[in-house]
Amino acid sequence: METVTAAVEYLEGINLASITMRIVMSMVCGGVIGIERGKAHQPAGMRTYMLVCMGAAMVMLTGQYMYYHFQTGDPARLGAQVVSGIGFLGAGSIIISGKTKIKGLTTAAGLWTAACIGLSIGIGFYEAGIIATLAVSLTMTQLKKLEYHLIFDDVWLSVYVELDDAVKMTDLVREFSPAGLVIGEVQIEKKRKGFQKAVISLKNTEHKSREAVLQFLEGVEGIQFVKYTA
């Protein structure tokens, strides 16, 4: 027990082992959250989350270093600047598509939370950082399914599709219209030989359930793969 206590106290100080552990742990925690956002084809993915979390950890490490070695500085003030300053990244991930649909709010909130996790790890509050990472990961993955079940008549839906190379948007418009789906915004991600990738915003005018819309899209000729992005 004394050995564990001594090890914890050692890692709470500023030394090579604690610095390495905090940086690596912040990258891992940020990456865990970012993987889900990357799979959802959001603008901020694994590497972005890793960098945000690690950068925040570095701010707290620097503040702690200044306080211990120069008896000056305030780590809390440095952390406060990160919490407020991270907003520019969050704002950059929010996209308005169509006329009323706003995307990227979850990604923006995740970036802000990743920065907060980085601050906790950077100051040596490892337990909170790990628990918060698990909580955010659970929120973004498992609670998404619950949200879909409760909110089943979204007016605007965002889907990721892989299309045959010969398919044109005008063809999809003709296919979607009878089903009450109106194409709002289209973002072509990549074009490869034989198929193309895109993220499409759809207006669900008949308020069909997400399952019904997805089933319809899977049956449309020319669509090889489809899934919701958020």
Image: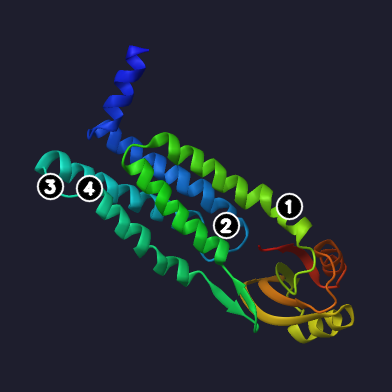
Which quarter of the image is occupied by the N terminus?
top left
Q: Are marks 2 and 1 in contact (CB under 8 Å)?
A: no
Dots 4, 1 in contact, CB < 8 A: no
The image's mark for residue 162 is none
Q: Earlier in the sequence, mark 4 or mark 2?
A: 2
Q: Which of the two marks, 2 or 1, is nearer to us in this view?
A: 1
Indicate which label's residue lies in the foreground, 4 or 2: 4
- Element assignment for label 2: helix
What whole-number distance in Å separates the C-alpha atoms at marks 3 and 1?
48 Å
Considering the numbered disc 3 on the image, is that residue within a helix, a strand or a loop?
Answer: loop
What is the CA distance from the residue labelled 4 to the residue labelled 3? 9 Å
Q: For mark 4, what is the residue?
A: 63
User: Which sits earlier in the primary sequence, circle 2 or circle 1?
Assistant: 2
Mark 4 and mark 1: span between their CA atoms? 40 Å
Q: What is the three-letter code of the residue carrying label 4?
A: Gly
Q: Nearer the viewer, residue 165 or 104?
A: 104
Q: CA distance from mark 3 to mark 2?
A: 39 Å
Image coords of residue 118 (percent x, y): 38, 47
Q: At x 85% / y 70%, what residue is drawn?
A: 208
Give percent across and percent down for residue 78: 26, 54
Q: Is residue 156 left or right of residue 68?
A: right
Question: At 56% from the left edge and 43% from the top edge, which residue is drawn?
Answer: 135
Q: Tell me the residue that label 1 is attached to.
A: 146
Residue 168 visible in image:
no
Above or below, 171 against 221 in this view is below
The residue at the point 33 percent across, 37 percent down is 124
Which residue is the site of mark 3? Answer: 72
The mark lying in front, picked from 3 and 2, is: 3
| Residues under numbered marks 4 and 3 in contact, where contact means CB atoms less than 8 Å apart | no
Pick whichever of labels 4 and 1 is earlier in the sequence. Answer: 4
Q: Report the amino acid beneath label 1.
A: Leu
Indicate which disc, 4 or 3, sits on the residue closer to the N terminus: 4
